[in-house]
Image (cartoon, rainbow, N blue to C red):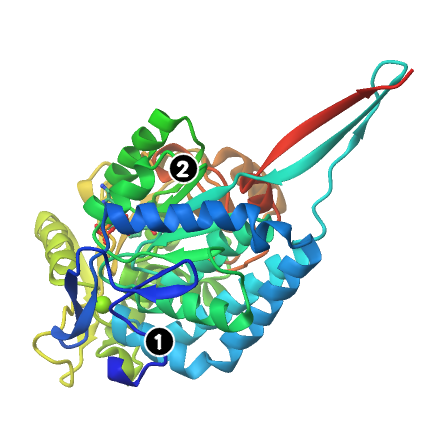
Amino acid sequence: MTLAALWYPTDKCFIDGRWQPPANGKTLPLENPSTGQVIGQIARGSKDDIDAAVAAATAARTGDWGHLPAFERGRLLGHMGRLVLSHVDQLAEIEATDVGKPLKQARADVLALARYLEFYGGAADKIMGETIPYLNGYTVYTLREPHGVTGHIIPWNYPMQIIGRSVGAALAMGNACVLKPAEEACLTALAFAAIADEAGFPRGAINVVPGLGTEAGAALSEHSGVQHISFTGSVPVGGLIQTAAARNVVPVTLELGGKSPQLVFEDADLDAALPYLVNAGIQNAGQTCSASSRLLVHRSIHDQLLDRLAARYRALRVGPAMSDLDLGPLISANQKSIVAGYLAKGRDLECAAKGEISQSAPTGGHYIAPTLLAGVAPDHTLARDEIFGPVQVVIPFDDEEQAIAIANGTDFGLVASIWTNSGARQMRAAKAIRAGQIFINNYGAGGGVELPFGGIGKSGHGREKGFEALYGFSTLKTIAALHN
Ligand code: NAP
Ligand code: MG
């Protein structure tokens, strides 16, 4: 794929309905992680471009976009969803090239983006307020209103899905959006702007400013013209975003990853569990906020399950995104060195199995073999830190109480799954585990546009996805009329 073949410019910002070079004229190199080669340049947007984008979004709120009735916003989102589906192969190829994810994963991400647009398009005119019984002589009701201008700082791991869930919900509620995609992966954010334009979104409703987090990202999170910020990414940057937003006293939604466990009890259906146990850890080469990186296994089935997990690991193949194997490369040399650093810290652990890097993998790509580690104590660094690579640790437990204590023993709380056929244990464990999402006898890393998603603890706060996100992207006004 060459950037010149794309139907939209990749080295510009999209501001106020127009493709514009960044004000400073600067660009950043764009790397294909499967080869390590630079394949083009993207805009290095800065504070000036963010100022222009926030001004355009502010004007859109009182202009054509702000005047659209809810059902017309929904219709535009639905139309955009259909356009995304009409570009499915091309978008999948763009995302696979930019992020390094296997083509089938990239395709699943495009379909998820279309589903978000359909879901939030359908919901746009179904958010209603309440009438509230109050004192005699009063009529009281509530209105759900948009925040105004919303900022969206997007990571590189699932650009399309994360844009779909946050920007889709924000637009449905009538906000005007400014997106800062990740420097490492901004091509589908720009495609999103191009498709929104084609769908007929009024100017200023959607603005995209690529660039560095420390420049464009910081300018967006500090901007006094932004009324809500949605961020997905690392814990330290999440803290910076929240601090910046606090100075302007605006709400933030933070989704900061996790160390999500799967608890496998002695009565679990192991045949059903096996594919989920592994896939939840290696999907997108483990670069998934809701990846399941800890497998907690009852000691009575530990050895037989470890053998079966190891066999699956040995069959995993890693290679360039376009060869569509089980795993692609990591996003960058930097991410690969972070993961390699963790593996070095795990040298004392038992390496139960590794997958294989294909001979077709170019030497410049950022490949790492998926690794299954056993004999891991729950307080080991590799059992506590988010590695964000294809590494899973297996931790044995002796009883339910201990399993739950281990599950709750990290700073995170994003997702967990419980594998057992005991109904009572399913209910008990689901209540006892601290996480934003619990799956019983399945695991849904990233799946389910309808399901509210978000964390507790260092996994962040606020909920995206599902109907719940629409409440987060709006504010409630109470109107009390005295009429006697
Ligand atoms: P990151 O630094 O948190 O980046 C996420 C987004 O925030 C990117 O768009 C980034 O821009 C932007 N950003 C960075 N610094 C910023 C700042 N000071 N102000 C405003 N925005 C800023 O994540 P990363 O460096 O790409 O990855 C590092 C680690 O973060 C990973 O190893 C993983 O543990 C975690 N992570 C988690 C998720 C998740 O889904 N929860 C996603 C990605 C990463 P630029 O990248 O363009 O600088
Ligand atoms: Mg890239």
Q: Nearer the viewer, residue 106 or 369?
A: 106
Estimate the x, y position of residue 274 in percent, counting from the top left. 41, 65
| The image quarter in which residue 388 lies | bottom left
Q: In the rendered structure, are the residues bearing label 1 and label 2 in contact, judged by CB atoms less than 8 Å apart?
A: no
For the point 8% across and 74% down, the residue is 364
Estimate how packed mark 1 is, as few (under 14), some (14 to 19) or many (20 or more) residues with alpha carbons within 10 Å: some
How far apart in space, not on screen, are marks 1 and 2 (Cα)? 28 Å
For the point 27% across and 42% down, the residue is 219
Residue with the mark numbered 1: 8
The answer to whether 209 appears left or right of 62 in the picture is left
Residue with the mark numbered 2: 225
Residue 241 to residue 178: above or below: above
Residue 441 to residue 92: above or below: above
The answer to whether 257 appears left or right of 480 in the picture is left
Q: Nearer the viewer, residue 254 or 389?
A: 254
Secondary structure category for the residue under label 1: loop
Q: Is residue 316 visible?
A: no
Q: Nearer the viewer, residue 114 or 316?
A: 114
For the point 51% across and 51% down, the residue is 60
Task: Report the amino acid beneath label 1.
Answer: Tyr
Quarter of image, ligand 2: bottom left
Label 1 lies in ligand 2 vicinity (Cβ under 8 Å): no
Residue 41 to residue 463: above or below: below
Estimate the x, y position of residue 184 in percent, counting from the top left. 22, 61
Q: Earlier in the sequence, mark 1 or mark 2?
A: 1
Label 2 lies in ligand 1 vicinity (Cβ under 8 Å): no
